[in-house]
Image (cartoon, rainbow, N blue to C red):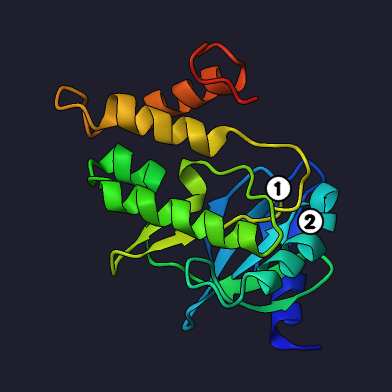
């Protein structure tokens, strides 16, 4: 059993996706719709542990990261198991955090994200589920994209195009606030998912 497998086995997740316990060698850094993410202490790696109902995504996401290995905009993958993957730990802020904290998102960042998605498309993938929480602006000023499990889905996803549209029509305007509280951002995301913002449909 390798070290990553040993660490993964220390993580106990309740059937209601409540985290019960995990190794002292891990630091909880995030929770998403399908997994918990931990930084492996004293390393530059992160381990993503999928909830029991989403374990199938570990294999899917690992395979997609392998396809993206030579593209610098995506993390390297170092290992995978039945319910986990191990990738680079990214130091920086998500675009969600950038807006919540007032960190400026510049036009060149948007262009880089576009280019990163284009490179993924050239590998035969269909980048999907692109949102503010899975795009990082690193401490070095680089763009990194994570959470690629849906990059092989067949249907078209309009989320990134809608984000770009909002960036151009709203965010770049002088009057538009560059710092918005997380509670308001979450509210906007809820309305968007429900289809209550007519100009920005998910489909």
Residue occupying image coordinates x 73% and y 68%? 62
Q: Quadrant of residue 165?
A: top left
The answer to whether the residue labelled 2 contacts the one labelled 1, judged by CB atoms less than 8 Å apart, is yes
Above or below residue 75? Residue 121 is above
Please say whether residue 78 is visible from this viewpoint: yes
Query: Is residue 26 shown left or right of residue 62?
Result: left
Query: Is residue 16 shown left or right of residue 108?
Result: right
Disc 2 is placed on an element classified as: helix
Q: Earlier in the sequence, mark 2 or mark 1?
A: 1
Give the class, few, some or many, for how many residues have Cα within 10 Å of label 1's Cα (few <14, many ≥20).
some
Q: Where is mark 2, residue-wise? A: 57
Quadrant assignment for the C terminus:
top right
Residue occupying image coordinates x 82% and y 45%? 15
Given residues 197 and 17, the one toward you in this image is 197
Most distant residue in the front direction = 122
Q: Position of residue 124 (x, y in %)?
A: 71, 60
Q: CA distance from mark 2 to mark 1?
A: 9 Å
Given residues 78 and 38, the one toward you in this image is 78
Q: Position of residue 102 (x, y in %)?
A: 23, 41
Q: Quadrant of residue 40?
A: bottom right
Give the number of the disc on residue 34.
1
């Amino acid at each position: 059993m390798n070290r990553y497998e040993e660490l993964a086995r220390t993580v106990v997740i309740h059937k209601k996706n409540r985290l019960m316990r995990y190794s002292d060698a891990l630091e909880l850094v995030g929770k998403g719709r399908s997994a918990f993410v931990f930084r492996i202490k004293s390393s530059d790696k992160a381990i993503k542990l999928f909830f029991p109902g989403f374990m199938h995504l570990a294999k899917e996401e690992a395979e997609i990261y392998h396809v993206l290995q030579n593209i610098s905009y995506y993390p390297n993958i170092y290992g995978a198991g039945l319910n986990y993957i191990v990738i680079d730990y990214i130091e920086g802020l998500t675009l969600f955090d950038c807006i919540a904290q007032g960190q400026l998102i510049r036009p060149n960042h948007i262009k880089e994200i576009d280019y990163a998605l284009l490179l993924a498309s050239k590998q035969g993938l269909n980048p999907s589920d692109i949102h503010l929480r899975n795009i990082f602006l690193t401490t070095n000023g680089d763009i990194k994209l994570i959470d690629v499990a849906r990059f092989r889905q067949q249907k078209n996803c309009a989320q990134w195009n809608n984000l770009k549209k909002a960036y151009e029509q709203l965010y770049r305007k002088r009057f538009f606030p560059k710092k918005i509280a997380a509670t308001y951002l979450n509210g906007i995301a809820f309305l968007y998912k429900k289809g209550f913002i007519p100009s920005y449909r998910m489909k």
